Amino acid sequence: MFSKRVASIELSGIRKIFDMAQGDAINLGLGEPDFQPPPEALEAIREAVEKGYNKYGPSKGFPQLREALAEKFTKYADISADNVLVTVGATEGMLATLLSVINPGDEVLYPDPGFVLYKPHTIISGGKPVDYPILQENDFVPSQEDLENRITKKTKAIIVNYPNNPTGGVLDDSHLKMIVDLAEDNDLLIISDEVYFNITYENKPKTFLGKYEKVIFINSFSKEFAMTGWRLGYLIAPKEYIEQIGKIHYYTVACPQSPIEYAALVALEKSHYYSLMMVEKFRKRRDLIYELLNKMDGVNPNLPKGAFYIFPRIELDADPMDIVKDTVKNGVLCTPGEAFGTAGKKHIRFSYAASEDDIIKGMKIFDSVLDKYR
Ligand SMILES: Cc1ncc(COP(=O)(O)O)c(C=O)c1O
């Protein structure tokens, strides 16, 4: 009755766990900022609707928005509006990319633990997903050896995601060079999911953009401007890729949402202060949750350097999945590391896109749940 394609992918198991939560649970499971979009953007979306931006727009996005995005990233690469495709979130950008570059049997390297899209998107595109570990002992960055061991004649692309979900890891210049060199030597496409590009705490963001010819840079308005529900993202890539990916994009979504594009352009022009404000709030919360987790027996966190997640290893003789279920039953949402791949099995992901109050209360409950397993 259904296609082999759809039968070969599964919905993530996280839902079942979240369904166990009571209505007033403390939410440290969310993958989105706990802020509303910037006030200028809220005003702009009302204005857009009233002005009549309720119709189909250009398939690749409003020219002014594509230009503004090219301008924003021009310090990293020699790009223009022709290199930009506005998408329905990074999610559509990722799938349209893979559908445009993967032939049956092509292998795609993706991180384990890693965000939940990469494997199913590769399968839907007819490719073979090949995971590579990003481990806590290596600051959640892949080792050269692990990557080399997985590259075959069939490897077409490597998906990278820094700042990283679920680990909070970031890359430094030497990691970036190592991955670019491997891609160059093996003629691989780098598909770089940089939706947390602006959320770093120690150093300025590092990007693959402009570091190598065959880079598809995927980004989004979701996290930078707290617009997850507005579903707007973008790709930056060589023009010939934009043309081809733009075909899949056209036949799946026709065009991005006109009023959202209008408001996103206003956010780009006026709301930089807002994302800086969020990052400063996240930084305080990161320090707080790290300190609280670090004090707990049997819990070993790394200090996150980007995004808004912390991914401690549970060093107890217990299955973190059971601990998560208990924690959720006790009113605190968090996510089992195995939802992000087998290498995440000993971990739990907490999102600190939550108030300091909730973080303090949530960590207290988590610590008392752990007592049962100590
Ligand atoms: C690493 C990563 N990539 C992509 C996405 C999806 O972004 P968008 O809302 O733009 O589709 C998320 C959302 O959580 C994410 O964490």
Image: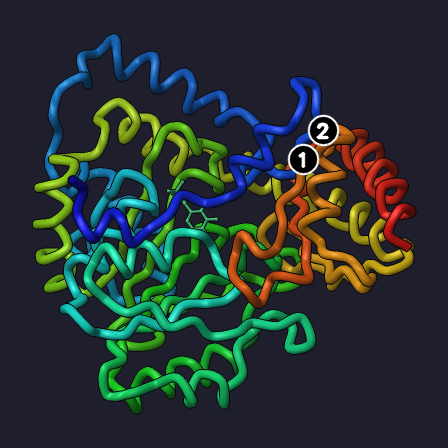
Residue bearing mark 2: 26
Looking at this view, is 43 or 303 the one in front?
A: 303
Which amino acid type corresponds to the residue marked 1 in the rendered image?
Leu
**7 left or right of 300 in image:** left
Q: Residues within 10 Å of mark 1 (few under 14, many from 20)?
A: many
Provide the secondary structure element on which disc 2 rests. strand
Specify whether residue 319 is in view: yes
Task: Tell me the residue at 9%/56% (across/down).
Answer: 243
Q: Which tag, 1 or 2, sits closer to the chain's start?
A: 2
Quadrant where the C terminus sits is: bottom right
- x and y, in percent, of residue 89 in the image: 33, 41
The answer to whether the residues at label 1 and label 2 have Cβ atoms under 8 Å apart is yes
Provide the secondary structure element on which disc 1 rests. strand
Residue bearing mark 1: 333
Quadrant where the N terminus sits is: top left
Tell me if residue 332 comes above or below residue 369 in the rendering: above
Task: Tell me the residue at 34%/26% (across/down).
Answer: 263
